[in-house]
Amino acid sequence: MPTHKPLHLEKLIRVPNVHGYDVAPDGKTAAVVWDKSGQLEIYLLPVSGKGRPKKITSGPESKVAPRFSPDGARLVFAQDYGGDENFDLFLYDLRARTTRNLTPDTPDTLNPDVSWSPDGARLAFTSNREGLFATYILEIESGAARRVTHHAYTDYGAEWSPDGKYLAVVANTRGQTHNTFIVDLTSGAARAIANAAGPIDALYPRWSPDGQRLAFSSFEPGLYSLFTFHLETGELKQETKATHEAFTPNWSPAGRQLTFTWNEDGNERVGVKNLRTNKVRYVSFPEGAHSQPRFSPDGRNVFFIYNGPRHPPDVWSLSLASGRKRQITRSLPKTYRPGDFVSPKVARWESEGLTISGLLYLPKGFRPSAKAKPPAVLYIHGGPTWQYKNEWYVTAQALVSAGYVVLCPNYRGSTGYGRAFQEANRFDLGGADMRDVITGAHWLVEQGYADTKRLAITGGSYGGYLTMTALTRHPRVFAAGSALVPYLNWFTEHENEREDLKYWDLENFGDPVKEAERYREYSPIYFMENILAPVQMIAGANDSRCPASETEQAAAVLKDLDVPYEIIIYPDEGHGFRKIENRVDAYVKRVEFLKKHLAKRKT
């Protein structure tokens, strides 16, 4: 094992990915965030798929979140510097082919997802420039910005109504609940989407074309479901059944249909609901995840990003009349075929009376054996409110092609399985979720999928935190661990991280003064002497989410311990690595580190 030539990780990392897109109002052109050059840049290309992509940005920094103006003549996008997430907003004139920085030298964190006013004169955005994240309106010509929300919550985004009178503003209010506030831009008054009992959970709001209704996702039924809300009558209507989670609604141009995503155990399909007949049709590939669905301006097609275990993310379109799918961007080089990759299966195991699921990657031709058990890697997702979906994970593919078993657990706290499961680790972050990971490791061994002496663990962000928690709390389970952009000290993490994350901590983990005992008990930095396995930590110097100082704290302790360790900090990166050479260096070194310490059976 393996019975075939392992995939080359560096080449896989260099396979382009589409990270986002927008479609022009005339429906002819798409603006795509694509790393074809190794750098996140904005490309323009015809949605027909005919014609060469045209790169309209350049320079050493990443560009994200393109959005066409209502008249299609301009495009706004965001760019940060060294991954610091202090985005500047740039305006590209498609006729003059000129670019202007609307917010030069932004000193604060600015959410790159902005919304145009219907007249194209202003932009709505969220920023922490006055402390907690709030919503602002930017006058494009003058550059002046004014704040429009003043509540005690942290805003995540805003969408302008078609008549220009309102903003639908999403804010994290309590715990993991989000409310959508309808802000009257004339009076400044704000009201939350509510039922008779009061404000309800409401996320991803989108205005109907006539501005009379909002579609959104809500946790109210226990699973994220789609709802519509009528502004004048206050009528709330549930549009999807609460059997699987439905997200990201978008309206058809005539307001008669909604498109959305439908999540079934990490396979995420596109749904289209006819609001007159209440019939829903689903469109999908055999496996994988669809995201960012939206109708074409003429209502005849639905655009979306599709990616799966055998396909990197690309933009596609679907004809609603014929059902024909058409690929608009092409990222997978012709040197690869879908059969080169492994599709995972859904694994399930019991943990403290709950059923935990995850994605299990098995080498081609592998059969469980009592004798020759392979090494295995537990690949831990971040968030923690996130989910491993059946997507394009090059590190997992490289490992499994080299004969390793890979398990990606969706532990308590993950999305995709309802509100109770998502909130099951509140005030127990690093406790219940960590135990789900450990039982997953034991399950691998019990099922004959892994050698108990050759288990490793890796993850990024909150997954990096859980990696370090595993190595300090369960030191004899793993033979090696690699943590990317982790944190280890709840006190210093809370003190140094961004404002919206501080707010989330208070709502989901408690106050560091009042809950000091919990903060200490759940911080791996205080238990580093327990580590027995070799450990690697990789960070970005400009990280505003999990500051590099967290990794530096660990390095200061590790140097006095009798365990092999490796520390890597990239001076020009933030939370997650956008520069291709840094990504290659980090991800290759991670795999090499794990392979090195799993190469021989530990005794």
Image: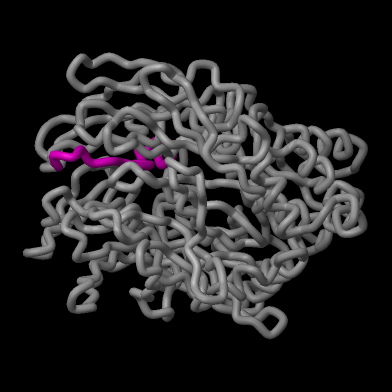
Q: Total marks drawn? A: 0
Residue 513 visible (yes or no):
yes
Q: Residue at x 11, y 51 (%)?
A: 298
Work out whether residue 539 can be spotted.
no
Quarter where residue 211 is shown: bottom left
Image point (85%, 47%), residue name? 525
Of the pair 452 and 178, the residue shown nearer to us: 178
Residue closest to the far front: 187
> Which residue appears at 65% of the width and 32% of the height?
130
Residue 572 relative to residue 62: left or right? right
Whether residue 209 is situated above or below residue 114 in the rendered picture:
below
Q: Which residues are magenta?
A: 12-27
Q: Is residue 20 magenta?
A: yes
Residue 240 horizontal/vertical position (percent): 35, 75
> Camera-side residue: 128 or 585?
128
Residue at the location (60% across, 53% down)? Answer: 382
Residue 495 x %, y %:
79, 39
Position of 117 relative to 458 (above/below): above
Vertical placement of 452 versus 331: above or below?
below
* Scheme by which the image is coloured: one colour
Residue 47 position by quadrant: top left
Q: Residue furthest bottom?
A: 353
Expressed as whole percent of the image width and height from the top left, the position of residue 603 reads 80, 61
Side (left or right) of 542 relative to 93 = right
Q: With 1 as the anchor, is 522 left or right in this view?
A: right
- Left or right position of 89 against 555: left
Q: Is residue 199 magenta?
A: no
The vertical placement of 436 against 291, above or below, is: below
The picture places residue 153, in percent across and down from the top left corner, at 63, 50
Closer-to-camera residue (362/356): 356
- Res. 113 image quadrant: top left
